[in-house]
Image: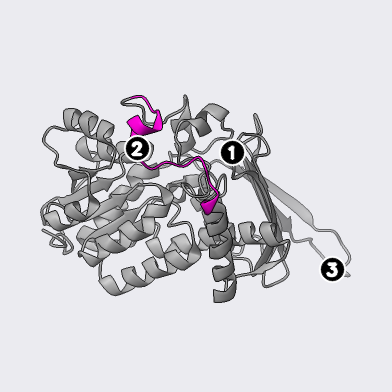
Amino acid sequence: MNGECSSAAGISALGIAVIGVGNIGSAHADCLARGKINGARLAALCDIDPDKERALRALYPDVPFFDDAGKLFDSGLCDAVIVSAPHREHVPLGIAALERGLHLLTEKPAGVSVSDVRRLNEKAASSGRVFGIMFNQRTSPLFRRARDIFRAGTLGELTRVNWIITNWYRTQQYYDSGTWRATWRGEGGGVLLNQAPHNLDILQWICGMPVRLRASCYEGKFHHIEVEDEATLFFEYENGATGVFITSTGEYPGTNRLEISGTKGKMVLEEGHIRLFTHAPRAGASNGADIPDIVCETIETGGETGGHAAVLQNFTDAVRTGSPLIAPGEDGIYELSLSNAAFLSSWTGEWVLLPIDAEHTALFDSMLAERAASSKKYNAGPAAERGVAPGDRGEAAGYKDKWQVNW
C-alpha cells in the first residue's frame, strides 16, 4: 500500500500507523480510531513496551500491533506514520519511514540535534513524500492573527520581542513518572526540549529567526533532575532588534505574556487576547519632535485552537489532495536551532551565531554526548523493568492540560 494514497481526492482512506503509543501517541491513535480525521484511518500501532501491547490489543483488537518499527514499515499496512516515540528516536524512525516510501508526521521536537535533523530534512526533500511536524499551536486563532498583524507591517519594523512563558509548571511526580524524562540520554534536554518547543516555534514563526543568541540554562534548579528546568535566552536580530525568552517548569502560577514592539507600535498577547497599540498620525504640521498619539484596541480572536487533530487533518489533506501544510516538517529545524544554540551558549558562556555552523553543531553534539554518557537515570526497557505499573503511561495528574495554551 505504501504511498498509494498520495494522489487527488476520491482515493481510499489514508492508512496511518502510530509509533510510540504513550501520552500523545495514544491521543493520536484514539483520534484516528474514532474517525475524527476525514479521509484517514488507524492502520497499525507500534511500541516496544509489552504492557502497552497487552492494553492496546484489548483496546483495538482489529488494529495490527508491532513491537518492531522495521517490521511495521515492511508490512505494507500503512501509507503514513506518526512518530511519537522519545525524542532521540524521531530522526532514525523518520528517515527509515521515508526510505520505505511512507509519508511522515513527527511529534515535536524534530530531533535532539540540528545535525540529525538536517539529515532528516535532506531525506524528506529527496523522498517525494509529505513530511509534517506536530506544531499544533500554529492552529491557534490568537497566534495566527498575531502573525498576520506583524507580517502585514502594522507594527513597522521589529525593535524588540519579549516572551515570558513560565506557566509550564511540573511537579517532581511528573518527572519521576518516566525514566526517560528529564535526562540527557533519554530526553536530550528539559523545558527547552519538552514544553517550550511550541513557544520557540511560534516566536520564530511570527518574528523570524534571530542571527545570534546568548543563554543561561539552569539544570535541576527546582527539581531533582539532570536537565534544565529554567532558561533565559537573549536574541539579536539582523536589523538590531533584540529579544528575551524566559521559560520555567518551576514557577507557579507563572506567566504567559508575549510582547512584540516595532517602529509603529506594539502588541501584547496575554490572557487569551491581543492588545494592539499603534501610532496615530497627528493632524497639521509637525517638527518631528512630537510624541505620537496611540490608538489602543483589544482583539478577541474567538474560535478554538484546532490542536493536534487540526494538524493531523491538514497532514491527511496534504497527502490526499496536495493541500499546503500548516507545519512543514522542515520547519522543525528552526526551534531546535534555538534550543541547541541556547544549550551551547550556556555550556560555553559564549554567543552562538545562527544558523548554527558545522563547527558549533559538532561542538554541541560532543558536549551533549558527554552529558548523555553520564546520564544515570534513563532506561529504555519495558515498563515492568522500569518499575512502572502495568497500564501506567507515565501521566501525572493534569498532564494533558499542556496540550492547550495556558493563560
Badge 3 element: loop
* Foreground residue among 67 and 247: 67
| 310 vs 369: above or below | above
Left or right relative to 257: residue 292: right
Instruction: Count the numbered circles shown.
Output: 3
Q: Which residue is mark 3?
A: 285
x 52%, y 55%: residue:
201
Mark 1–mark 3 Cα distance, whole angstroms, equals 62 Å
Start-end of magenta stretch:
372-389
Mark closer to the observer (1, 2): 1
Task: Tell me the colour scheme of the image.
Answer: one colour
Mark 1–mark 2 Cα distance, whole angstroms, equals 21 Å
Task: Give the amino acid type for the residue marked by disc 3 in the picture.
Answer: Ala
Q: Which residue is mark 2?
A: 22
Specify which label sits upstream in the sequence, 1 or 3. 1
Q: Which residue is mark 1?
A: 225
Specify which label sits upstream in the sequence, 1 or 2. 2
